[in-house]
Amino acid sequence: MHPATGRAHGKKGALPPDPARPRLRLGPAIRGTAPSAAHFGHIPTIGLLGNDVWDDCVFACAGHLAESVTFFGQGTETVITEAQALALYAYTGFDISAGPPGDNPTDQGATLQDGLQLMVTYGVGGVEFTMYGELDVKNTNQWQQALATFGPLMLGVGVGDIEQQQFDEGSAWTLVPGAAPNQEDHCVMLSGYQPGMYWCQTWGALQAITPAWFEVNAYEVWAPISSLWVSTRTGRDPEGVSLDVLGSLFAELTGQPDPFAQPHGPGGF
């Protein structure tokens, strides 16, 4: 914990993306203009999920995505535990008994795409995800429209000591003139935006991000899609899109059958 603020110091743990690995790209079929604002970051419970001691940021993000999907989609948050996040991490070869934090050879992190595939294959603490696809992180309208429609996104960013200090101080991630480029890859849940400010969930807290910082340091963004985003009570997602519309939009984006209209198996690229 930070001695002055009481906020937790964070670990990272995202591995660089593999450009040769096949992936489903959602961007080409996203048309129109995104809403001016969308925010799905204010959930009742958000924990560190082990990312204060382990390099499991991808799986901490997976847990936050499950919590947000259930809270905003169903009205009741499914709280994910550290043990559940680390259980998903274990599919990458992580073994918590192989050594303590900082001296565990299996604590190697994961790519965002690895985490997303495991979310679809196994779920997260009982929360199922149907499919996922990549968006163009440099196309602001595209990822904002995807966030407003499908819910929070998984974002890869570069961070360093300055970002840790700004987090500890409770201030937005902001570019500092003359600072060295960030070299450490980190995974966060991109949860909201409005003109002039974005938000993510990381290290157990809501973190503001300036668009200028995002432009320099965000390097990949993915949309995980869950049928739980659509309320079983109302039949509509938090932005008012019906289940039929959401499924049709997904089928149009991917060229695959509507995953919400029929039984389906795990999928993703």
Image (cartoon, grey):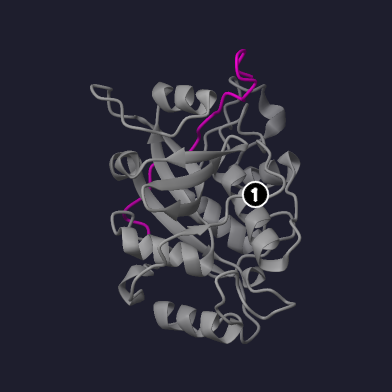
Instruction: Specify the quadrant of the image occupied by residue 264.
Output: bottom right
Residue 25 position within the rendered picture, expressed as x and y whole percent measured from the top left: 36, 67
Relative to the observer, which residue lies in front, 178 or 257?
178
Confirm whether residue 267 shows in the render. Answer: yes
At mark 1, the secondary structure is helix
- Residue under numbered circle 1: 63
Residue drawn at point x = 49 percent, y = 53 percent: 192
| Residue 269 in sight | no
Along the horizontal axis of the image, is 78 left or right of 129?
right
Q: Main secondary structure of the magenta part?
A: loop
Numbered circles on residues, count? 1
Query: Mark 1 is on which residue type?
Result: Gly
Is 59 colored magenta in this rendering?
no
Q: Is residue 15 magenta?
A: yes
Q: Residue furthest left?
A: 178
121 with respect to 147 (left or right): right
Can you say whether 231 is above or below 121 in the image? below
From what the image shows, is residue 158 above or below residue 151?
above
The answer to which quarter of the image holds residue 156 is: top left
Q: Quadrant of the N terminus?
A: top right
Closer to the camera in the image, 153 or 20: 153
Q: What residue occupies the far top of the structure in this picture?
A: 3
Image-quadrant location for residue 119: bottom right
Q: Which residues are magenta?
A: 1-21
Q: Quadrant of the C terminus?
A: bottom left
Measured as percent of width and height from the top left, residue 256 is found at 47, 82
